[in-house]
Image (cartoon, rainbow, N blue to C red):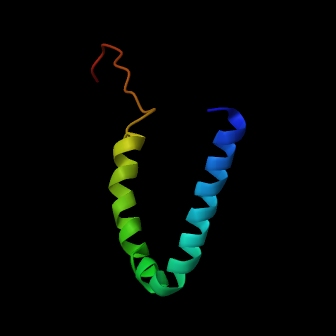
Amino acid sequence: MNLRNKRAWLLAAFSAALIGIFLVYPEHRQHLFGLIPYAFLFACPLLHFFHGGHHHGHRHQSSGQEL
């Protein structure tokens, strides 16, 4: 499959996706907007998991002396 043929398939798939979104969005817009608060709640633990929590960059250096 040459590059020109791949581009044609990619353009056709992208166009079909845009048409599908255009047709489905008006009917299901309220369902999608109703899920936004849950998306924020789901994003918080994911960000903590992938970000590494609150501990990065704060390494304690022990000097060997206790006060």
22 and 36: which one is in front?
A: 22
Residue at (72, 39) in percent of width and height = 4
User: Is 18 drawn above or below residue 10 in the view shown?
Assistant: below
- View extreme (left): residue: 66
10 and 21: which one is in front?
A: 10
Residue at (39, 59) in percent of width and height = 43
Residue at (35, 66) in percent of width and height = 41
List x then y, in percent, for residue 9.
62, 48
16 and 22: which one is in front?
A: 16
List x then y, in percent, for residue 26.
53, 85
User: Is 49 drawn above or below residue 35 in the view shown?
Assistant: above
Residue at (36, 15) in percent of width and height = 63
For the N terminus, give its image quadrant: top right
On screen, residue 33 versus residue 2, left or right, reads: left
User: Is 31 drawn above or below residue 7 in the view shown?
Assistant: below
- View extreme (top): residue: 64
- View extreme (right): residue: 4
For the C terminus, give its image quadrant: top left
On screen, residue 19 versus residue 27, left or right, reads: right
Quadrant hosting residue 2 = top right
Quadrant hosting residue 55 = top left
